[in-house]
Amino acid sequence: MSKSAAEFNKNDDGRPPAHVAIIMDGNGRWAQQKGLIRVRGHRRGVDSVRAVTTECARLGVGSLTLYAFSVENWKRPQAEIRILMNLLKKFLIDERPTIMKNNIRLTSIGRIEDMSADVRKELNATEALSAKNRGMVLRLALSYGGRAELADATKRIAREVKAGRLDPDAIDEETIRAFLYDPSLPDPDLLIRTAGEMRVSNFLLWQVSYSELYVTPVCWPDFRERELNEAFADYRRRVRKFGGLERVTVS
Ligand code: IPE
Ligand code: IPE
Ligand code: MG
């Protein structure tokens, strides 16, 4: 079947977005809607992480950044934090075969020093195990906040200036990028948020300046391969201009 005129996008190169970032929200609501306790939603959410990660790798996405735990999430009740940390630790151990089979390199961004020693141990082990993989980069945002990241970067830049290694007049956007948690992190092409809230909740504030936003009412535990492909299809209909004009014939 040929594409309808409305669907045809001359800017569509048919490729998936190179860098996908996801705000995985709605685990609690998913459980509540079913009369279950919140932890059941978090547990089911791990299955979505596996499904979406594997599908992204299969489709040739270069980089997937998942907002797993925000710096603000420490405000939650201790019991919920403990459950989330245990699930994270279990994920880091159990998913090693899937990560290796799909040639995925696992990395992390955020105030990793806030995580408990046992989580850091498993995180380091999975990062080390997958360090030589050359497929998709799976980046977990842990104890991550966009403002915290900019504050941490500013502190490090100030130290460089104080030590005489950096001229303040030479500071430009690339300098700031170089001091973010992961300077190799490309700007997300597509930012997905599940569970319907129209906000960025302190995620990748510097990096999303020109990302395409996609918000779905579907809660994270129900977001799987089909929903991901719908998001990608929507992305391919977008026209990205980065403040410029669409390529137009001027003469
Ligand atoms: C996302 O689901 C998981 C984390 C933030 C860690 P929530 O726990 O925020 O679920 P809702 O938003 O309460 O439904
Ligand atoms: C954003 O979800 C953080 C993560 C998905 C890890 P939240 O549930 O914490 O965001 P708010 O509180 O609704 O803005
Ligand atoms: Mg939430």
Image (cartoon, grey):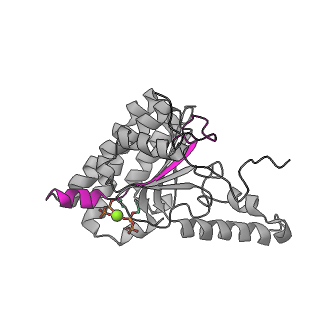
Quarter of the view holding residue 91: top left
Say whether residue 66 is left or right of residue 28.
right
Q: Is residue 50 visible?
A: no
Q: Relative to 201, say whether 34 is above or below.
A: above
The answer, for residue 231, to whether it is visible in the render is yes
Tell me the quarter of the picture where residue 208 sits.
Answer: bottom right
Residue nearest the viewer, comparing 227 with 122 = 227
Q: Is residue 158 positioned above or below 121 on the image? A: below
- Which residue occupies 47% across, 37% down? 56
Ligand 3 in which quarter: bottom left
The x and y percentages for residue 224 are 34, 42
**Residue occupying image coordinates x 50% and y 65%:** 145
Percent x, y of residue 211: 58, 55
Left or right of residue 147, residue 51 in this image: left
In magenta stretch: residue 247: no
The magenta segment is: 7-36
Q: Taking 220 as reference, is 65 left or right? A: right
Label total for image: 0
Percent coordinates x, y for residue 244 in the rendering: 73, 57
- Foreground: 73 or 164? 73
Which residue is nearer to you in this view: 37 or 92?
37
Question: Is 10 inside the magenta-drawn segment?
Answer: yes
Which residue is painted at 38% across and 52% down in the image? 118
Q: Is 85 left, or right, of 231 in this rendering?
A: left
Q: Provide residue 75's location: percent of width, then percent of height.
A: 36, 72
Please determine whether, in this image, residue 54 is positioned above or below residue 40.
above
Q: Main secondary structure of the magenta part?
A: loop
Above or below — where is 82 with respect to 4? below
